[in-house]
Image: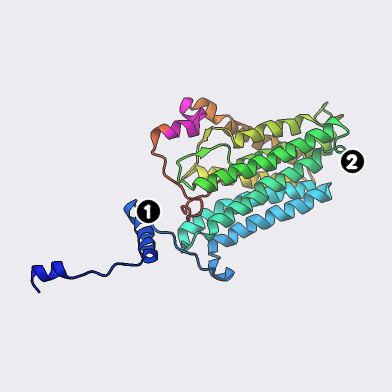
Amino acid sequence: MNGSEIRRRRIPRLRSRERMSSLRESIPRRLGRRPRKDLIPKPILKLISPADIFTLMNFLCGVLAVMNSVDGGDGFRKAMYLIVMGMIFDGLDGPVARRYGSSHKFGVWLDSLADAVTFCIAPAILVYNMFKDPSGSLFASWQGFIAIISSVSLATLGILRLARFSFYAHKWKDFIGLPTPAMALIVVCLAGCFYWSVELGIEIEYVTTGHTIALPLAIMMISFMMVADLRYRKFRGGIMYLQGFIMIMLIASLLLGSSRPLIGLTGSIAITLPSLLYLIMPLFGGPGRVWGASKWADLVDEEVVDPFEEPEEDMEGY
């Protein structure tokens, strides 16, 4: 077939609907983006990986912590213990995921939901039941009002913190805003100081006697750090062992405190100090840490993020 015959050959034209479909498929390739594929639902058992078992244990710790908080009394101690156990399981799912891997992103979303229960809902219910007005009135007294506001801010701002992290799904070097496990640890430490002080009969005005509003007010103000434009360091390497040691010490004090309240109080005070130090750490890092997200926008090119696309794998430590 010579050139003239090729030029005279008629090429059939696609129908308009087929042409538009072909054009839509070619646009993402031209822009360097993959065309969106429909996800086929899989059975739950095929989605769960070994790391997801630890995530589910984290979730169960949060549920049990809520149940014990409602019971009151010694249930407060058990709830604090379960929240700390949830932190340990939350810290283990990342290394297990890197060790055994996963062929899907199911664990990323499961981890976010588990953290919402254990580090947002459970501490909020613990704060409300521990510091509410003993008379049962909600808004009739300052004590009941502050307990409600503190617990609501703790749960709401924590969920907003998790939602922002899940939405952007970036592998950032540090955290933007106080991580929810760190906030839950601060709540457990302050609640432990109150609980063991009452057990030992220590009377401090506005803390353990009268209108106990000092600690819920402190928790309410600290909760805003979760959505603040602050850069918190993400610890890696050998310092992770120090974090694990702190968790074990706090668990030991909660367990031994049932028979020796002084040990429980000592453990809560000892863990409160490094927790508050981490809370104010961005203030010592210069403007780059005080205004974290704003400064990062000048350092990196912001990518177009589709919230319906699968996120990155490494999203531990919300």
Residue annotated with mark 2: 136
Q: Nearer the viewer, mark 2 or mark 1?
A: 1
Q: Residue at x 34, y 56 (%)?
A: 29
Q: Position of residue 101 (x, y in %)?
A: 46, 61
Along the line of sight, which residue is nearer the eye, 257 or 315?
A: 315
Compared to 125, does 102 lie above or below?
A: below
Sort mark 1 into few (<14), some (14-19) or many (20+) by Cα contacts within 10 Å.
Answer: few
Q: Quadrant of the C terminus?
A: top right
Q: Main secondary structure of the magenta part?
A: helix
Q: CA distance from mark 2 to mark 1?
A: 57 Å
Q: Nearer the viewer, residue 4 or 159?
A: 4
Q: Residue at x 40, y 65 (%)?
A: 17
Q: Nearest the camera: 239 or 316?
A: 316
Query: Looking at the picture, which amino acid does disc 1 mark?
Result: Arg
User: Is residue 292 in the magenta section?
Assistant: yes
Q: What residue is shown at x 75% (from left), y 36% (from top)?
A: 149
Residue 33, numbered circle: 1
- What is the x, y in percent for residue 231? 51, 34
Q: Is residue 102 visible?
A: yes
